Structure formats: structure tokens, C-alpha cells
Image (cartoon, rainbow, N blue to C red):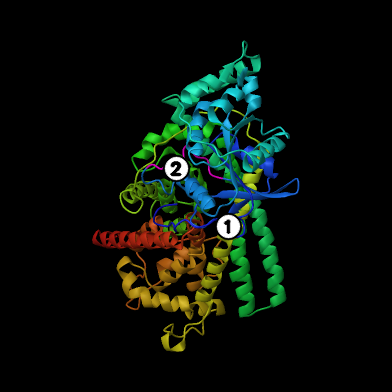
Amino acid sequence: MSDHCEAPAEAPREGASQTPTLVLVGRPNAGKSSLYNRITGGDARVGNFPGITVDVLEAPLDHEGRALRVVDLPGLYALAANGDDAETDEGVARRFLDNLAHEKTPTVLVQVMDATCPALGLRLTRDLLARGTPLVVIATQSDVLAAQGRSLDVEALRKALGVDVRVVSARDPDAKPTVLSAALAALDGAPPPRARSFDPDALGREVLRDAPRVDDEALAARARTERIDRWALHPTLGPLLFVLLMGGLFSAVFLVADPASNLVDAAVQALINVVGRRLGDGALRSFVVDGVLGGAGTVLIFLPQIVVLTVAMELLDASGYLARGVFLVDRLFRRAGLSGRAFVPLLTGHACAVPAIAATRIIRDPRERLTAVLVVPLMTCSARIPTYALLLSAFFASRGAWFRAMVFVALYVFGIASGFVASAMLRRSRTRGRTLPLLLEMPRYHAPDARVVARAGWRAAGRFVRDVGTTILAASALLWALLNVPMPAAFDHAGDTHTMPPAVARVHHSVAAGLGRALEPVTRIAGFDWRINVGLMGSFGARELMVGTLGVITGLEDVEDDDGALATRLREIRRDDGTRAYSTATGLALMAFFVIACQCMSTVAAVQRETRSWRWAGFTLVWTYAVGFALAVLTYQTARALGL
């Protein structure tokens, strides 16, 4: 994703070097995904190619008894090297093709070109011809071209390029044999193409012929697009409509996903109850139920959100509207070193950072994508709400409801502001580099291909369970050990806990409690004692667990449904000298810490998945914890100085 996390380019997947490879390349929105699914039947998997951090889809294919491999590279605009672009989609594609050439893998490039605007695709064709690799050009969307009353002069294009050119529609079952026959003919018999000098714009105009009469359907489609764009691209109403649409879509996504998540949660809880009864009491039951199954539940509860959000983004993108929305908000986001494409993941981050980080895949610039991944955790997600509610009721109970509401809104605003500030700082430091210009095509509005959208959701689900889920399970097991394994007697300073309930006493004697007491001399300057330190450790599993962990420590085990008792208990806790352990300054410091700190193992796992680097996951933890703690110290000391 960035030059900071990339390994040197290596060979393609071992064992594939002698398998003839068909590599699909093309511009975004050229119909490449639809054609890929038509050829492979949707049998795709994400290739784990060394040194590559964006998804490269691949699928094995048996064609007339001949084993082939079909690879779908990311959408790109050019292959020519241009400065510091090693981590762009173009740089990734170029390095991937270089690897194939180095391994002498039999390769044919299949360029997918939008037949309705060939001039744009011919710019990429010029770069592909310069490589000297067998090439065929597949002009897609022939049905759209025909509906517009236009045709492509295939013979003129073949003569100008010196390679085979075919016109297909990805919706037509005959597209598969047409593409494969042309590709294998180029691979087996045609001489390597030679670089040619031509003007893409002039050639595009020459080969695109208008029919004497455009049919009524084509005219209606053009009129419909122009009519919608008068509102969608209006300088005042356009941005407002985009924000309202995205807000509505954002709400709808989670309204649809929440019932599915609740069903998953109910199923996991039922399984936990069954397993718990069979295992009885003891450490094994606690580990399996709370550590393993609890972690699996965390993974599965996120799954509906991931799938629904992926499908929603695919629908927006395929319909043609997302490109227009990105254009509308681009100028605002440029001030923070981002582009309009970052709007969707940052908005989604206010519900959950995990699907929001996955949504950064719509950002083409790798440095911008990395920046968005690193700042998404600053958005005020829904998991922070229980902790904020607890702190507001515990430390601002004497204030009116309006005051507490204003503090709550301020936390949201501060999260957004900190995200923009952090983005601007990162773009000048860790993720600095040449910013790619925003290149967009305004495609016509059209109905998305349901199969392509559904398969995108399926791939997102598999990717999340495979990559993020394993990390969450491991982290859940570690957190269980910290909260349940007793501290060695020589380092245990819990004191007498015989009068406490067993669950409370176990936490008081745990490794987490020992670590919390060891950290207290440092965290005291922010108003955090060992209890809060343990609560923060427990909330790393999920931010909302802060409430339950503090409840167990203070002797209240069932606080999920009513945190009023816990708020009262926190106000009553006293130090040895009789003074209150927690003041308003403590509550303000905790809220300041939670606004910044990436206090969620699922988010860390998502960062690692998208960057394919534990280095960036660790960097996210370090910088958010360091800044969050510094802000907590500043808030606590300032509040004390003001007598709060």
C-alpha cells in the first residue's frame, strides 16, 4: 500500500510459472469485472502475491482440456512509469507483469476497453503495446453501443494497432469462447506486438462510427443521465443531496445489518449456553466460553455489516453515482490531504471502524488509502457510546440533560476534527509523497450487474473471516488470560479478597490487575488508577466492554442493561485518605483518551488486513495511545487547575 510497508517484488505464485496466464487489464468502469466473472464463472480468489498489497483476483480455468490461469489486475489508467508511483495500482500492475516476464510465464494480455469511449482505453493500449507481450483488445458493452446507434470499426482498429480486436457484451454467454479463442490464438501463434505511434484521441474518433439514426432508447438514456446530473452535479444542491443520500444509505446499511447481527449474536449465545452447561464450572469452561466462543461471536457479529456495506458500495459504484459524489466533496477533503473518495469510509467509521477500514478500498491512491486507514479509528464509532454514557452519568449527573447532550455532540465533533488534523499531519510525515490527481469518468447511469455485486459481497465475507477473524480469536484468548490467570504470589498486591464474590476476586488477583497496579504510578497523572487501567485492558476486546469490566472490578457483574448502579459506585469509591477516587477531571480525561485511542482489537486486525503489515497496525496503536494519553494528561491537569 505504501513504500513503507512494501517488500521487494518477487515471483508470482509458486507452481504457476508454466501455466499459461491470461491477464485482464483495463480502466475502471470498462466492464472488466463483469467479463472476468463471465469467463471464470465467478470462481475467484484473492491472490496472495509477494510484494503486492491490493487485491489481484485469480482463478484456474480448464478450456478444452487446457489448464489456464485467469488474473484480474486492479483497474488502471496507464502503465508507464511516472515518478514515485510504485505503490499505485499502475505500479502494482507493472511489477506484476514484470514478474511474469522474469519467470518466463506464457502470458497474454487481455485489455478490456469500453467500446462507447475507445479514445480513453487507447491510451492504455499504447503502454501495453510497448511491453511486447502478446495482446488482444476486447471492446465490451457492445449492447450499449448498439443501443446508442453507434458501431466500432473493428478492422480499422486492428490495422492501426496490429493486434486482434473483438467486440463483446459481458452479458452474452458467447463472450467467454470469443475472448478465450482470441487470447489463445495470440498466445500460441501471433508474433509479439510492436510499439506503435498513434494519437489515442484521433484514432478513437476515427473508429467510432455514428449510425444514421440513434434509436429512441439510446436518446432516452442520454436524456435521463443529463436530467439527473442537473441535480446531482448542481454546485449547491449536489453536495447537499450527496451528504443526505450517503447519510441515508449509511443508516440503511446498519438498519439492515443489525437484525442479522442480532440473529448471529443470539445463535452464538445459544451455543455458549449449551457448551457452558456441558463443560460445567472451571477454567476450561471460562476459556472456551469467554475466550474462544466470545471471540468468534465478535467476528461473526461484524460480518453482516461488512457484507451489506460492500454490496452498498458496489451498487453505488456500478450505478455511476459514486464518481459524481466523490467529485462534489473532493475540494473539501483535499485540505486534509485526502480526496472525495475518503468520504465514504470516514462516514462509515461513525458506526464501526472495521467495515469503514474495508471501505477504504475505493481509494485508488495508496498513500491516501493508508492515511484513511490510519485516521478512521478516530471517528466516534457506536462502540464508544456505552462508555461515554457511563462517564456522563457518573461525572455529570448533577448537570442537566442538555449539558450532557452538548458534551456528547462535542465528542463527535472532536473526533471528526482530530481525524482531519491527523490526516493533514500524516500526509506531511509518515504518508507524505506525490498526491495522485483525482481521475474520474462520469459513466452513464445504469443498473448494476447483480452477479458481480453478490460475488463482491461473498469475497468480502470470506476475506474478513479468514484474515481479520483469526487475529480477533488470538487477541480474545490473550485478553482472557490477562483477566483470568492469577498474578504470581510474589507480585500480587491485591490484599484480602475473601469477602468478595469469586468473579470479582479473580479479577483482583489477575495478571491484568497486577499490570494495572504496576502502571498506576505512570497513569496517575491522567487520573487513572489501577481499576481504570484494568478497564482499559478489558475494553481492548471491544470498547463497550469497559463498562462490564469496571462493573466486575467494583463488585457489580450485571451492568450491561443498567449502568446507573455502576455510575453510583464509581462516585462512591474512596482513596485510603477518604477522598473521592474519581472526580469530574477523571471523567473528562477518560473521554479525551477514548476519543483518540484505538481501543479495539477488531480495528487493529482490520488495519493489519488492509495494509498487510503488522508494522502499520502497531503504528496505529502507538500513535493513538501516545496522543490519547497526552491529551488525557492535559485534560486532567487543566480540569484540576480549574477546580473540576
Residue 546's place in the image compared with 230, above or below, is below
Task: Give, as a single range, the part of the protein colored magenta.
Answer: 73-82
Task: Answer yes or no: is residue 258 visible.
Answer: no
Report the residue at 31% width, 52% height from top: 429
Is disc 1 placed on a helix, strand or loop?
A: loop
Q: Nearer the viewer, mark 2 or mark 1?
A: 1
Task: Answer yes or no: is residue 494 visible.
Answer: yes
Q: Residue 13, which numbered label?
A: 1
Q: Residue 214, which numbered label?
A: none
Residue found at the far left of this picture: 641
| Quadrant of the rendering where the C terminus is positioned | bottom left
Is 284 situated left or right of 432 in this image? right
**Nearer the N terminus, badge 2 or badge 1?**
1
Residue 557: give x, y in percent of width and height: 55, 70
Residue 608: give x, y in percent of width and height: 49, 59
Mark 1 crowdedness (10 Å alpha carbons): few <14, some 14-19, many ≥20: few
Report the residue at 38% width, 39% height from top: 333
Q: Are marks 2 and 1 in contact (CB under 8 Å)?
A: no
Three-letter residue code for mark 2: Ala
Q: Nearer the viewer, residue 209 or 218?
A: 209
Residue 330's place in the image compared with 623, above or below, is above
Three-letter residue code for mark 1: Arg
Based on the picture, tell me whether residue 125 belongs to the magenta stretch. no
Q: Residue 342, which numbered label?
A: 2
**Quadrant assignment, res 492:** bottom left
